[in-house]
Image (cartoon, helix red, strand yellow):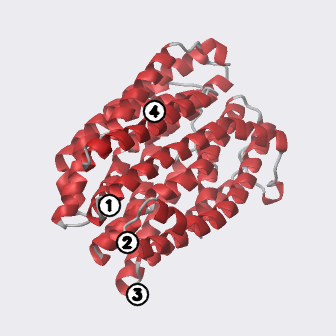
Amino acid sequence: MAAKTYSMTEGTIFKGIIFFAIPLFFGNLFQQLYNTADSLIVGNFLGSAALAAVSSSGNIINLLVGFFNGISVGAGVVVSRYYGGGNSKMVQKAIHTTIAFALAAGVILTIGGYFLAPRLLVLIGTPYDVLPNSITYFQIYFLGSLAFVLYNALSGILQAVGDSRHPLYYLIISSVTNVVLDILFITFFNGGVGSAALATIISQTVSALLCLGHLMRTQEGYRVSLRAIRFDWPMLRQIITNGLPAGVQNSIISLANVVVQSHINSFGKMAVAGSGSYAKIEGFGFLPITCFALAMTTYISQNLGAKKPERAKKGARYGFLCSVLLAEAVGIGIYIFAPTLIALFDRTPEVIQYGTLHARTVTLFYCLLAFSHCAAGILRGAGKAIVPMLVMLICWCLIRVTYITIVTQFIPEIQVVFWAYPLTWTLSSLIFYVYYRKIHWDKLI
């Protein structure tokens, strides 16, 4: 059966964006459930120390994975442009080069992640009583690097051509598999945190194989042939040019968050567990932000490829409005129910206290985070990926790290660390707003 794709260059703008964004939303929802299952089951069955071990590795994982995911975003922009312009030959070159890059990146990430784990965890000051379990979780997790890098590349290809439904189906299957295996390994086989990482590897491999199988079976112009997977160097140059800024941006943000995590670690394992629990909840709060940012990148790229700048401009306005309103509504909900939500992971009063403090410091500012991410997605789709990279470098890395480093010397309280997020979201939103107002859409085609 051929995949149902949505051409975002024709028809009602709002309907096209929403129909594309809804599967993205549910896909990201299941991705977050997928990521949360480890923490939820580990926290309830293995205790606070094990939960802290899983939580402490999150930002480092994002640091190493984020770069390659950014390149996949660039690949999606290239595929969208050629797909929107009806150039099937170049679409074929783009998707097979993307897969070749993903395979190479997966191997590099497996080796690098496995051997860097102990050094990075020590470097960020992971509590001593948490460190052994953190290293175990981290190293096993990165043995599955090839699967999750490949899945991100393959799902990005489908999203770039307007098919956001099939990635959703595969994430649902993968998420259910992950939860079942988590429960089986931890509760029935009495496995530790390493078994949670193993469950993640298996379920991610399932989703990658399903996605690859679909792309090999489709009769559309973006069909994948294993024999055609190779590097086309001019195409790889295009992909790197579009994706490198996003990759650097992801790594920069994650690096800054690793610094933030190191300050949180200094407050002990209860702070790590509480803040880590909130981070899982925050992932759900970010869903409207993530799905509209991704939708905007595809929408803008396809419409500029089809030489429809006015349609691109109107769609950008819808994206901003929807993502900001939805994100703020979710933020208010998390603010109100924070203690109950944190308790789902760990009922220890101190863990709940830290997690609730983190939530109630940042959630009312989700609207600003949404605006920044949506603007970044629009600019990437417009071929201006260097702009969000620079904005994030300045606001979310340099200023965030400088603020924490200086202010905590005078006010050594964990809430000072938490405030780094809304303050830097505010700055990035202001800069994006000023830049966006100066865009000449006719000059982007």
Q: For the residue marked with disc 3, what is the amino acid?
A: Phe
Task: Locate residue 252 relative to residue 178 in the image: left or right.
Answer: right
| Residue 233 occupies quadrant | top right
Closer mark to the observer between disc 3 and disc 4? 4
Q: Is mark 2 on a helix, strand or loop?
A: loop
Mark 2 neighbour density, 10 Å: few (under 14) some (14–19) many (20 or more): many
Q: Is mark 3 on a helix, strand or loop?
A: loop
Q: What element carries label 4?
A: helix
Which residue is painted at 45% across and 22% down in the image? 431
Residue 393 numbered tag: none
- First-in-chain label (2 vs 1): 2
Closer mark to the observer between disc 3 and disc 2? 2
409 or 12, which lies in front? 409
Which residue is the site of mark 1?
272
Q: For the residue marked with disc 2, what is the amino acid?
A: Val
Q: For the residue marked with disc 4, what is the amino acid?
A: Cys
Q: In this view, does 132 lie above or below 422?
A: below
Q: How far apart are marks 1 and 3 (CA)?
A: 27 Å
Q: Distance between the residues labelled 1 and 4?
A: 24 Å
- First-in-chain label (1 vs 4): 1
Task: Locate residue 333 relative to residue 300 in the image: left or right.
Answer: left
Which residue is the site of mark 4?
395
Which residue is the site of mark 2?
130
| Residue 65 occupies quadrant | bottom right
Q: Distance between the residues labelled 2 and 1?
A: 10 Å
- First-in-chain label (1 vs 3): 3
Q: How far apart are marks 3 and 2 (CA)?
A: 22 Å
Q: What element carries label 1?
A: helix
Which residue is painted at 52% across and 35% down in the image? 393
Determine whether label 2 and label 1 are within 8 Å by CB. Answer: yes
Which residue is the site of mark 3?
189
